[in-house]
Amino acid sequence: MELKFLHILTYLSLALVASHAALPVTYWTTKLPNTPMPKAIKESLQPSGLTEDKSTSVNVGKGGVNVGVNKGHPSGGTNVNVGGHKGGVNVDTPGGTHVGVGKGGVGVTTPGHHGKPPVSVGVHPGPSPFLYNYAAKDDQLNDNPNVALFFLEKDLHQGSNMNLQFVKNANGASFLPREEADSIPFSSEKMPEILNQFSVDPDSEEGQIMKQTVQECEEPGIKGEEKYCATSLESMVDFTTSKLGNKVQPLSTETQNENTQMQKYTILGAKKMGNNNNNDKSVVCHKQNYAYAVFYCHKTETTESYMVSLVGADGTKVKAVAVCHKDTSQWNPKHLAFKVLKVTPGSVPVCHFLPQDHIVWVPKN
């Protein structure tokens, strides 16, 4: 009987979680009909705050099953419990999200500013190497897995071998619905208020990471770059379609294994993406390290995007997005790409593969 209840509530909790993503998914299908959603976006559509009804509760334990709706409750959100707090299934989404299965099977915590759960962005502080103004330190050449992702355009062909490592960002932050995201300040000036809302110590590593992300979003772009930090899926879609039109194709890197070791990969094939008239135009969105999903999106006129099929020495197959920048003359001369490839700004096209949680948008026919 208890096992049957577990199955029922597991199904019910998953159904509730799925319903939380309905609003942004509906927006996606309305704005981008017949456009497949890439894996990187799907994985950022976890239920943190993505609720249309902020007051649903389901409880199963010694008292049986209770389902209630209370829109006036101050915390809001969804709560599902099976078998008490020590085991079973537990799902809480009061702005933030907690998912627990069994005594130690699955645990997910994502932030929300109402309930103030712990924030963990999952990485060490440091600027993103995919931003044009990025200046790398010499010691980053040794311990940064993104180093291997940069390469020269001349090496983008079938049969080419590269030593690569595809690592998924430990930041599992989820999208907030636009209404909630827009209600939270996002500026250096309001940083004390932001950190307080998420109960983050300003001097902690998490606090420093959040500050840096906001600062990167506020910095002016280089000449010819149009940049925007999207704090919701809806705002990402709006920015992209405002630059490329509604006929767009979003792409992300997908690997057979979530995290791969550094190893030799062989390129099996590469296909240029985009239409014939705008094949040098794209919007690339890099997931930033923050308490909820924030993507640094920028559009340039001098990029080409490719879908590249690779196979690793251990047999791991990867469908990777590669972006080649034709004009790097405005990049920071100390950029990681120049140190790795030993070239100078503007001398040759610079390419890089995108990590699994980044997205490139290209026009489609």
Image: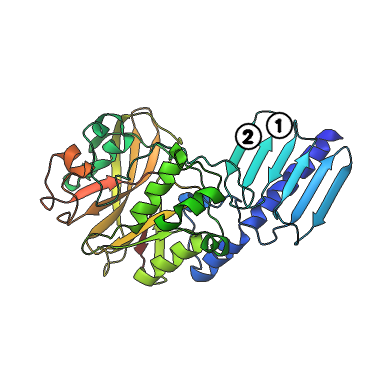
Neighbor class of circle 2 (other Cα within 10 Å; few <14, some 14-19, many 20+) is: few
Judging from the image, the colouring scheme is rainbow
How many numbered circles are shown? Answer: 2
Q: Nearer the viewer, residue 168 or 263?
A: 168
Q: Image check: 350 left or right of 117?
A: left
Locate the C terminus and report the quarter of the image it occupies.
Answer: bottom left
Q: Where on the picture, by quarter, is residue 243? A: bottom left
Q: Quadrant of residue 313?
A: top left
In the rendered structure, the answer to whether residue 202 lies left or right of residue 112 reads left
What residue do we see at 64% from left, 30% from top? 105
Report, in whole angstroms, how far the alpha carbon at label 1 lies from the one at label 2: 7 Å
Say which residue appears at 65% left-offset and 58% top-offset: 51
| Amino acid type, label 2 | Val
Labels 1 and 2 touching (C-beta < 8 A):
yes
| Label 1 packing within 10 angstroms: few (<14), some (14-19), many (20+) | some
Considering the numbered disc 1 on the image, is that residue within a helix, a strand or a loop?
Answer: loop
Which residue is nearer to you in this view: 3 or 329? 329
Residue 292 seen from this side: no
Residue at (66%, 62%) from the top-left corner? 52
Residue 324 or residue 230, whichever sits in front = 230
Q: Position of residue 68 (x, y in %)?
A: 81, 55
Position of residue 81 measured from the top left corner of the image (x, y, whole percent): 76, 41
Query: Which residue is the site of mark 1?
Result: 102
Residue for badge 2: 106
